[in-house]
Amino acid sequence: MITANFNSTAVIVFLAFFVLVTVIGFGASRWKRGDLRELHEWGLGGRQFGSVITWFLVGGDFYTAYTVIAVPALVYSVGAYGFFALPYTIIVYPFVFAVMPKLWRACHRANHITAADFIQGEYGGRWFAAAIAVTGILATMPYIALQLVGMEVVIKGLGISGEVPLIVAFLILAVYTYASGLRAPAMIAFVKDIMIYIVVIVAVWLIPSKLGGYGAVFSNADAFFAAKGGATGITLKSTQFTAYATVALGSALAAFMYPHTMTAILSSGSERTIKNNAVFLPAYTLLLGLIALLGYMAISAGVTVTSSSDVVPQLFNKLFPSWFIGFAAAAIAISALVPAAIMSIGASNLFTRNLWRPLVNPAMTSHQESATAKLFSLIVKFGALIFIIFLPAKFAIDLQLLGGVWILQIFPAVVFTLFTARLKLPALFLGWAVGMVLGTGLALAQGLKPLYALSLGGHTYPVYIGLLALIVNMVISFGLSAVLPSRGRPQTSVLRDPDAVALRD
């Protein structure tokens, strides 16, 4: 369990901060008091979070432990291509500003808790909403597992091996999420984000000063990739342009379709809160760019690893004192707890509202609804833990890439429904099904890689599979809707709301 590079000082600092967030997690049930036997209180925090809380909460579930580990690891491995996360986060916030206040209003008016609730309210029936829910849960499960991967990496960097620390950490997470619901990650997100900002600011200031400045960092990285050859370098190759652009665009469109980001949005207290956050959340993009630079710094520092996921811990172990290593490890580990909690809550809301209640127990009370969601949140976290313990982390990474392809297929139903009444349920259902099958098939054919080589006019363009599947989905959804006979939307439809004109403005 304890390896040769065990760092006792770092472990003590790490445990101190972990205990701090555990206390905060359990105490969160008393914050902004509400009846946690109601699902909208447990699963959405009572829909009362203001701009500051929402800013930390959205940042907490959007910028995760795996982001801090994986983005520098990708930059370390392939260079400039690893920076695709920057344009992706730049694209996503105008989308949030334009779309998410409309979705919040529709869901708030009709007391919807999930995106699938919204779809059922707009089109009626149970099965398409159930398909949306299943898609969200499938896409979320490997995402939770990746948070475990991030935590496992930083614990190993402290000199502790084995699964016992991971199991203990997630048992604690499971208990306080069960007790406090969304209030727990919302409160912990304050601590998490402040710690991450401190770690990154110190790192980007101090590490280059130890390596001869940023000029030396980029020069060393350039020489490293030149020697490595292939499609790597500190600037993009021409063959990477379409891959870079389509992955960035596809990721941006998918980002706020995930249950955890949707949950954070729907927990906001008002439309204005969401718009305010869309304006100020790009501060996290700056943070992400600085995090990505750690990949180049690791190259310049001469860090060598067998797994690229170990790059950040090994860089910190090489250049920082023990106490700061422990602080940084705690910041990254807490960055796993916050999104994992929100992800499990989002998946639980979908299971309870759109699978269990309509298909199994339509007569369940609101208190039974909350109890079912709490139980399923435990099952989801336990499933992710088992996944990581018994299967290689590579499977979680591959499935998360596939999860991005899947979650994109709910985009037409969720987003375009807010702007037009012309879409028909059969068309959307068929478009979703074809998109899921096509995206999954192409990904499996590529060995669960996210890109497909599209041949046009004698040239080959690598394109993100999720975006290809989405385009086919949209063609079917709009094309078939145009020829199907019109049927009125249910009375709960947002487009039947007397204020719908204002909503569409």
Image: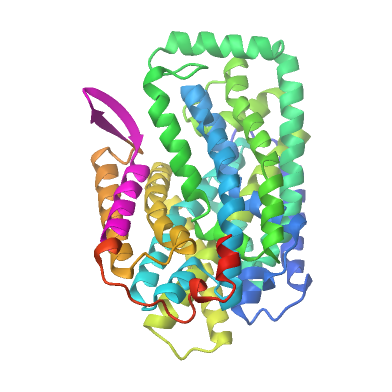
Q: Image quarter for residue 453? A: top left
Q: Image quarter for residue 358? A: bottom left
The question of residue 469 being in magenta is answered with: yes
Q: Nearer the viewer, residue 250 or 297?
A: 250
Q: Nearer the viewer, residue 346 or 23?
A: 346
Query: Is residue 458 shown left or right of residue 266?
Result: left
Query: Is residue 222 shown left or right of residue 461?
Result: right
Image coordinates for residue 237, horizontal then vertical, percent = 42, 17
Q: Is residue 8 visible?
A: no
Position above or below: 365 against 411: below
Image coordinates for residue 483, horizontal then vertical, percent = 24, 64
Position above or below: 248 against 58: above
Position above or below: 246 against 258: above
Give the quadrant of the C terminus: bottom right
Span colored in magenta: 452-480
Outermost residue toward the left?
458
Q: Nearer the viewer, residue 471 or 197?
A: 471
Outermost residue toward the bottom?
363
Give the quadrant of the N terminus: top right
> Which residue does the image show at 43% across and 74% down from the upper left?
120
The question of residue 41 being in magenta is answered with: no
Image coordinates for residue 85, horizontal then vertical, percent = 53, 36
> Which residue does the image show at 69% across and 64% down from the upper left?
184
Q: Nearer the viewer, residue 491 or 391?
A: 491
